[in-house]
Image (cartoon, rainbow, N blue to C red):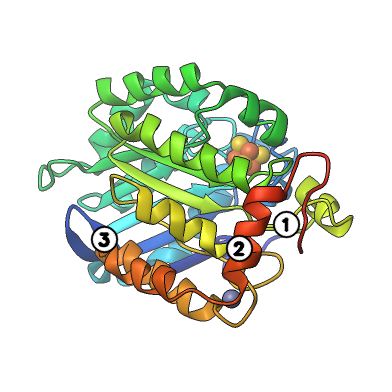
Amino acid sequence: MISEQTEKPLACWKSKELHLGEVIDCLTIIFKSGGCSWNRCRMCGYKNERFARISEDYLTDRLMNQLSFVLNEFDPKSYQMVKIFTSGSFFDSGEVPPKARSEIGRAFRGKTIIAESRTEFVKSDILSEFIEKIDDGSKEHPFYVAMGLETTNDYIRDKCIDKGHTYDDFKKAVAEGRDAGSGIKTYLMMKPPYLTESEALSDMKKSIADVTGYSDIISMNLCTVQNKTEVERLWKQKAYRPPYLWSVLDVLIDAKVHILCDPVGGGKSRGPHNCGVCDPDIVGAIRDYSLTDDRDLLKIYYDKGCGCMDEWRYVLREEKPYCMPLTS
Ligand code: SF4
Ligand SMILES: [Zn+2]
């Protein structure tokens, strides 16, 4: 029996976010839900987080208790934006029952909401219903649906990630979202497994250019090694290395639009990293850039360089699919 007093989301925290040219306070919530219906992506650790084999009513109660915890813990006046994640898709009714979804919407009415979902659950009628709950007329864009496209290359998404949807599916979901009056946030994934550093870099640059016309917000996730994932198995076999922070700087400096990027696990062996010496400054610069859109912050460190930049350049030049990763 789960105690109602102690039932918390998987995670919940406040941070700053650059939105429409303004730095605002944002509450991020990761609800524990019925779990992802796809459950197969090679890098995903959240797929293990779920309430299994339970009734809709029980699941609704679990979510309501988590919502109460959040509302008690964080003063609603202290944030303007709410980012909602689940251990899968917020708009999958098997995972987040409609009643729970409505209550969550009502609780955050008047805020800017961003909620993540797989493409197949992005339907204009379901989104419209949710937008009605949150929209008090005070914002031109009260809602953004966030989708993990990861890359615009169907082959890479299928073989390296096993994501289970296509670029066309994403475009259809964008149209459904637009029909409902939703903004679009697109997540891309830097360096899924089975790509060389150079392939990962090119894939990200192309994906950013491709999705710019479909997205109001683009966020680049840097692949990390999460527990109990296929990526972790490969990493333990020394068959996977997370991206170099130099690659991340290269992508962000090169992009024509602002890209949100939180280098989670930056500087650690399970996260994006360089040599260990230059990592803290670069991780800080990426965070600052994400919040300010000031590319010069990145260029300072890119131009300054480090002894490990030669290693990164060597890897870009010499790493081949049959002999990778060259470094750890
Ligand atoms: S769709 Fe999302 S939650 Fe589901 S397995 Fe893939 S990354 Fe994880
Ligand atoms: Zn270095």
- Quadrant where the C terminus is found in the figure: bottom right
Q: x, y percentage for residue 136? A: 15, 44
Instruction: Evaluate if marks 2 and 1 touch, with contact meaning CB atoms under 8 Å apart.
Output: no
* Residue hosting label 2: 272
Q: Which element carries disc 2, helix, strand or loop? A: loop
**Image position of 158 with respect to 115: above or below:** above
Q: x, y percentage for residue 42? A: 73, 41
Observer-nearest residue: 18 or 328? Answer: 328
Residue 224 in which image quadrant: bottom right
Q: x, y percentage for residue 34? A: 64, 41
Question: Residue 241 shows which numbered tag?
Answer: 1
- Quadrant where the N terminus is found in the figure: bottom right
For label 3, count other residues whose C-alpha is less than 10 Å away and answer few (under 14), some (14-19) or many (20+): some
Image-based side of 64 in relation to 255, left or right: right
Amino acid type for the residue under numbered disc 3: Asp
Cα separation, mark 2 vs mark 3, equals 21 Å
* Residue hosting label 3: 293
Q: Is residue 6 visible?
A: no
**Image position of 9 with respect to 210: above or below:** below
Amino acid type for the residue under numbered disc 2: Pro
**Image position of 184 with respect to 115: above or below:** above
Cα separation, mark 3 vs mark 1, equals 28 Å
Q: Residue at x 49, y 49 (%)?
A: 85
Of the numbered discs 2 and 3, the one sitting upstream in the chain is: 2
Amino acid type for the residue under numbered disc 1: Arg
| Disc 2 CB within 8 Å of nearest ligand 2 atom | no
